[in-house]
Amino acid sequence: MGLPRCNWNLARAFVFTLGCYLASFMADAQTTAFAKKAIPTSESLLISAKNNSHDISMADLQKLLKNNPDTALVDVRTRREVTLIGGTIGVFQNQIIPRGWLEFRIGDAVKSKDTPIIVYCGTNQRSPLAAQTLMKMGYTNVWNYAGGFFEWRKAGLPVEQGDKAPDTALYSKPVKVAKNVWSAIGATAPGTYENGGHNNNLSFIITSDGVLVVNASDNYHLASALHNEIRKITKQTVKYVVLENGQGHAALGSNYWKEQGAKIIAHKGAAHELEERGLEILDRMKKRMREKGAKTKLTMPDIVFEDKHIIEMGGTRIELRNLGPAHSPGDIVTWLPAQKLVISGDMSFHQRLLPIFEHTDTKLWLESWKNFEALKADIVIPGHGVATNMGEVRKYTIGYLKYLRGKVAELIENGGGLKEAYLIDQSPYRHLPTFRQLAKRNAGAVFRAMEFE
């Protein structure tokens, strides 16, 4: 019996169908494997980052920060989180660079790839990923503080609050400094959206015939918030608002106070600054503050003086004095002789590195300081920092100016240039807030001025 004749057409169709099925099966398998490999879960990414990052304990972190002041400590949470959830680690090496901006901003904060960098967040989720990113970018000394901000705060270690008064636009609420004298102490950081532009001291004096406010504040919204706090303390009307100088955070809230019927008082130098640059200062503030800058309008002072302006109010003598050139045009102090208390404005600084502008004449500031010392004040409310005494503001103001000018003088004598000025050792002041932002800029400004003294 012979073999049946093969139907070759049917066989070819079967083989073709089988081949298509196998190809489809293999393609599906490859696609599934590729998908599993190419689209990892957030959990797997975090596990991988934790496995590849180097953790540092709280004790070792404290030791490293103490022994290596060049260490960069980076909080990768957002500024909004920092503001709403109790602040950030309070050491001078700390800076906030949100995780989403890390790749773009780390180069401005850390110049050397070998600089020790410690990253942290709140719950050890973003910081391992941040550490992994930095290592991929070539940074060779990266650590992850796994305990994060909450462990640090729980241990009672220093914390810098993003906002001490979250229920108001003020960074902090007014505190009583002396009898009938109060001050809302501003943040030591630059003015930001988060602190509402409240980075200088907003003070006021209560008398039986009204209130005098020192500094109109950065914007209408902030001025209104300060007024609300004043109303909680006294029923007296705000009659005068004094501008310590022509800077935005001293003057831009003036239109709010004008609406309340107060008279705005300033030195002629501050008035000139507002005439020349007021609109530019206003525009810059509105871009920074966004909706918080609404309703703010440039407003010129009602009363302008040159050397001294005396106010007798409710049995209190208040002397507004220009003691000579200092930090910026139109700097004045508010002197209460009966209490030996001075609201110094930017004649003196405390708890932060002072900025030196292009128009700041540090040589003349040294001369004006003699007039400031001559007041023999027992209590000083500085332009920035908590109320203190003359010794403290002397250390952080005139002490710093003499130190920096001395270093620049040595550099010039030895034939150094501007490039070397930026490298001047200012480490005795590196613990102060704003050091990173201002130290090199200050050195450059002083060098350019002293070249021609």
Image (cartoon, grey):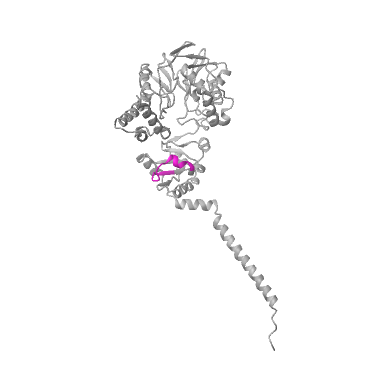
Residue 168 showing in the rendered view = no
Residue 370, position as x, y percentages in the image:
35, 18
Residue 111 counted in the magenta span = yes
Q: Where is residue 169 shown, x and y percent of the image?
A: 54, 28
Query: Looking at the image, how many numbered discs can be counted on the residues?
Result: 0
Question: Where's the C terminus, which quadrant?
Answer: top left
Which residue ends up furthest to the left in the rendered image?
A: 414
In the rendered view, tell whether residue 77 sits above or below residue 253: below
In the image, 381 versus 284, the foreground residue is 284
Q: Nearer the viewer, residue 300 or 375?
A: 300
Q: Is residue 52 magenta?
A: no
Q: Is residue 245 above or below residue 27?
A: above
Q: Which residues are magenta?
A: 104-118
Q: Image check: 75 left or right of 447?
A: right
Quarter-of-image position of residue 335:
top left
* Quadrant into which the N terminus falls: bottom right
Which residue occupies 65% across, 73% down? Answer: 15
* Residue 47 seen by the camera: yes
* Residue 157, x across and y down, in percent: 42, 37
Task: State the residue in front, 155 or 77.
Answer: 77
Residue 110 is situated, as x and y percent measured from the top left of the image, at 42, 41
Which residue is rendered at x = 49% and y = 48% of the image?
129
Is 123 placed left or right of 360 in the picture?
right
Identify which residue is drawn at 51% across, 52% down: 45
Q: Residue furthest bottom?
A: 1
Residue 266, relative to residue 384: is it above or below? above
